[in-house]
Every structure is written in structure tokens, then in C-alpha cells.
Image (cartoon, rainbow, N blue to C red):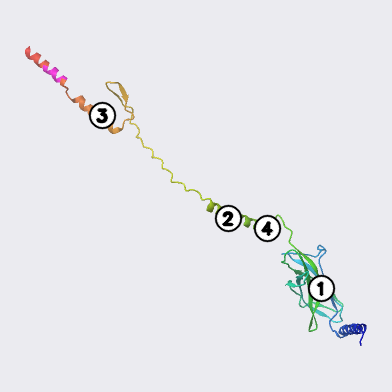
Amino acid sequence: MMRPAFVLRALLALVLATSVSASLFSNEPDVKVTATFPEGNPFGLVVNGQKNEMSMAVENASPKNITLVSFGGSFHDAVTEAFLRNTTARSVSGVVIPAAGKLTLPYVFHSEFKPKDLKLHLWVDYLDGKEKWRATAFEGIVTIVEPPSSLFDLQIWGAYALVLALIGGGSYWAYLSYFPQKKRGARARAPKPVEVSAPVGTVTASNASGSYQEEWIPKHHLRKAKKSGEKSDGAITSGDESEGAKKRRSSRRK
């Protein structure tokens, strides 16, 4: 009967032999890639809506030249490591790094996540002759943050103005809907002023009771009064007739 310790040793020896044989017979070039945040971002903050830059340092420790193809990456959940989204890929096709050579290139990517911690995975694709390989450059936890607000940010002011306009329009509509205003009646038209003709002059007339001014008497009444006065002046009264008859009688007697 085989002992458990013997079986465990046999399995360990098999695993070790497999790893040694894989390293001996593997033809993957010895390429080391490291991605780092700039000095101004020591905590590895990834800002939404802005360009996030990292430096990709590639070291070719193999005896052959390698040709870079592209930089890429992906975001994953910090706990479950579930895939979320790829980062922006950058083509660096045609860049050759000779044997024992080093090269550092910038890599810029964007983020559009809610503020939280995520796992970021970055890599470099390169060619060794005609065979394509991928080397991991960064794999760690980063913090997604929102950009700092500014009083001179036109986008924020535009958003505030839009919100205020919507609130004002909704309030005005509610006011007209629930508090209707009474319709005002038509205004009464003021009577037109009566035009009074200017007096021709001051006419003074006398009668039995005294004198009065005819300044404000209408013209047509004055004309009628004048005509009647002229007729009365030229007519012979009954008194005049009796006096003439008396004179005639006295002359006849003489």
C-alpha cells in the first residue's frame, strides 16, 4: 500500500519537472515591461473624463531584436476580477528595440466609471520575428475619482443654467395651470370732449331786466336774434299810428 507522503512527494516532483522543462523548451523572449504613474500622481488616481498618462518602460533582455505592436489594457472588478471594459489601445507599430535595449514610451487612457476602486491590467504586444507575444506591464488596484470642480468651468455653469431654466419653466406652467388669472374686462371708453366753437366776440345786449353777455350763446341763436331785432326797428307800432292820426285831426280843425 502506497503511503500518502510518498504520493505527495511524487506529485511535487512531477510539477517541478514540468515547470523546468517548460522553462527550458520555451522560446519566449526575455522582455520586461513596467508601467508607472507620473510623480505627480503617487497614489495611482484615475480621473474620469481626463487623460490619464502612464510611462511604459520596455527592456529587451533577449539576444534578438523585438518590434513593438501596441499598448493596451482593461479594467476589472477589484473583488471578483470580472472584466468591465478595455482601455484605449495605442498603436506603436514599427518601433524596434534592439537586444539588451531599453525604451520608455507614454501611454494615455480614459476612464468613465463611478468613483470606486478597480483593478487595472496593462500590457504590451510585440513581435519576435514573426511570432507575437504579450508582456504584462501593470496589474494592480487603482482609484477612480471625479475631476475637481472649478468656478470657471463652463460645463458646470451650463448644467446649472439648464437646470434652473427647467425649474423656472415648470414652476411657471404649474402657476398658470393651478392659479389661473381672471380675464380683465374691456375698459370703458372715455366720452369724446365736445368741441366748443370759439366766440366771435363779446356781444352785450340790454333788455328790461338789464344787460347780459352773449359770449357763450351759439352762433345760430345770435343770428336769429339779430334778424328779429332788425324787423322790430323798421316796423310802425300802434302807438305811432295814433299820434299821426291826432296830428291830422288837429290840422283839419285849424
Q: Are marks 4 and 3 in contact (CB under 8 Å)?
A: no
Q: CA distance from mark 3 to mark 1?
A: 126 Å
Front position among marks 4 and 3:
4
Q: Are marks 3 and 1 in contact (CB under 8 Å)?
A: no
**At 82% across and 80% down in the image, what residue appears?**
66
248 left or right of 63 in image? left
For residue 212, above or below residue 105? above
Q: Circle 4 sits in a helix, a strand or a loop, which is it? A: helix
Disc 3 designates what residue? 225
Q: Position of residue 172 (x, y in %)?
A: 56, 53
Does the magenta-highlighted stretch encompass residue 125?
A: no
Disc 1 designates what residue? 137
For residue 49, above or below residue 235? below
**Residue 156: assigned label:** 4
Q: Residues within 10 Å of mark 1 (few under 14, many from 20)?
A: many
**At 28% across and 33% down in the image, what residue appears?**
220
Front position among marks 3 and 1:
1
Reading the chain from its start, which is encountered first: label 1 or label 2?
A: 1
**Residue 170: assigned label:** 2
Compare residues 8 and 124 and report the one nearer the observer: 8
Name the dominant secondary structure of the magenta segment. helix
Q: Circle 1 sits in a helix, a strand or a loop, which is it? A: strand
Front position among marks 1 and 2:
2
Amino acid tagged 1: Ala
Q: What's drawn in magenta, residue-wise?
A: 239-245
Q: Position of residue 22 (x, y in %)?
A: 86, 84
